[in-house]
Amino acid sequence: MSNHKFGYVALVGSPNVGKSTLLNQLVGQKISIISRRPQTTRHRILGICSQPDYQLVFVDTPGIHSDQKKSLNRVINRTAITSMTDVDLIIFMIDQKGWTVEMRDAFEKAKSKSTPIMLFINKIDKLKNKAELLPLIERSSKLHSFVDIVPVSALKMKDREGLLNLIARHLPPGPPGFPEEQITDRSQRFMASEFVREQTFLALGQELPYSIAVEISKFQEGDNGVLNIDAVIWVEKTSQKSIVIGREGQQLKLLGSRARVQMEKAFVQKVYLNLWVKVKKGWGDQENLLRSLGYSED
């Protein structure tokens, strides 16, 4: 155990660079929801990977973004920035397109923490010509003294073990901080709400999912071993409610069916899910309502 390594690793970057996909791949199980939409992740989530020689605690953070019109956006940004405090390593992620203005702004916040930073260039599977990587790596190396620059495809990861070993090399020695079987700090109740919210990003229009929050009002295992879950989908406007429900309730049934499948995979038991849609006007711009719906900087 004297050679065992332990540490916290923050996954940081602008929205939609693949942080949550990377987290799920490294941990080996889905614990963070994903979609092709930016800013899908709203909360700080720990993903824990335990191996004989190390335990890595990945901190999945919301994407750092410049649009802070609502209180929700400001809370999400503060969550991302405070999540970089007291970590042993920052993995900053860009994608194959290179450094955008937004990515540079996010990087300035990461650099201000004086923490060792690895750079991951994600989505290299989308490059038609791999030779394009070399000038991007060269430009990146001039921006900062990264401890490593790693081209990677989070979606089509080929060498998970090698990547974990590389990250572990940059962490301090120490005993495990969590039980070996634990893979996240989040409860099943929290995960259930996230699985419902994920389906709104996958099924609904461009803007509507950003006006949605999910609250679990019941989470109880019955005598028959079935997990009974009641969830409320909160929207900001009455007009949004009818969109989420859909014609004759078909949209809501589809959301519920797909979320239930994800829950049963994650919880390894049968789930009975009830969904309701309710209006809470302006929830995304009232910090007291945000706290009641589970949004904080922690």
Image (cartoon, rainbow, N blue to C red):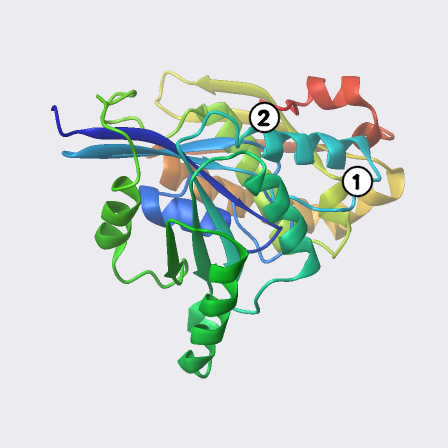
Q: Quadrant of residue 124?
A: bottom left
Instruction: Give, as a three-letter code, the residue at label 1.
Output: Gln
At label 2, counting other C-alpha atoms closer than 10 Å, the crowd grade (few under 14, some 14-19, many 20 or more) is some
Tell me the quarter of the picture where residue 64 sits.
top right
Position of 109 compared to 195: left or right? right
Q: CA distance from mark 2 to mark 1?
A: 31 Å
Image quarter (top left, top right, bottom left or bottom right) of the N terminus: top left
Which residue position holds label 2? Answer: 230
Q: Residue at x 29, y 20 (%)?
A: 177
- The residue under the point 44% across, 26% down is 188
Image quadrant occupied by the C terminus: top right
Helix, strand or loop for disc 1: loop
Q: Which label sits on residue 68? A: 1
* Residue 178 appears in the picture as rendered: yes
Please tell me whether residue 73 is drawn above or below residue 130 in the rendered image. Answer: above
Seen from the viewer's position, the closer of residues 147 and 296 is: 147
Q: Which amino acid type is shown beneath numbered disc 2? A: Asp
Q: Nearer the viewer, residue 271 or 43?
A: 43
Q: Position of residue 203 (x, y in %)?
A: 64, 54
Q: Is residue 18 visible?
A: no
Determine the secondary structure under disc 2: strand
Categorize mark 1 by other alpha carbons within 10 Å: few (<14), some (14-19), many (20+).
few
Please tell me which of labels 2 and 1 falls first in the chain.
Answer: 1
Q: Residue at x 75, y 46 (%)?
A: 66
The location of residue 71, given as percent across then percent down, is 80, 30
Identify the residue shown where x is 47% and y is 79%: 132
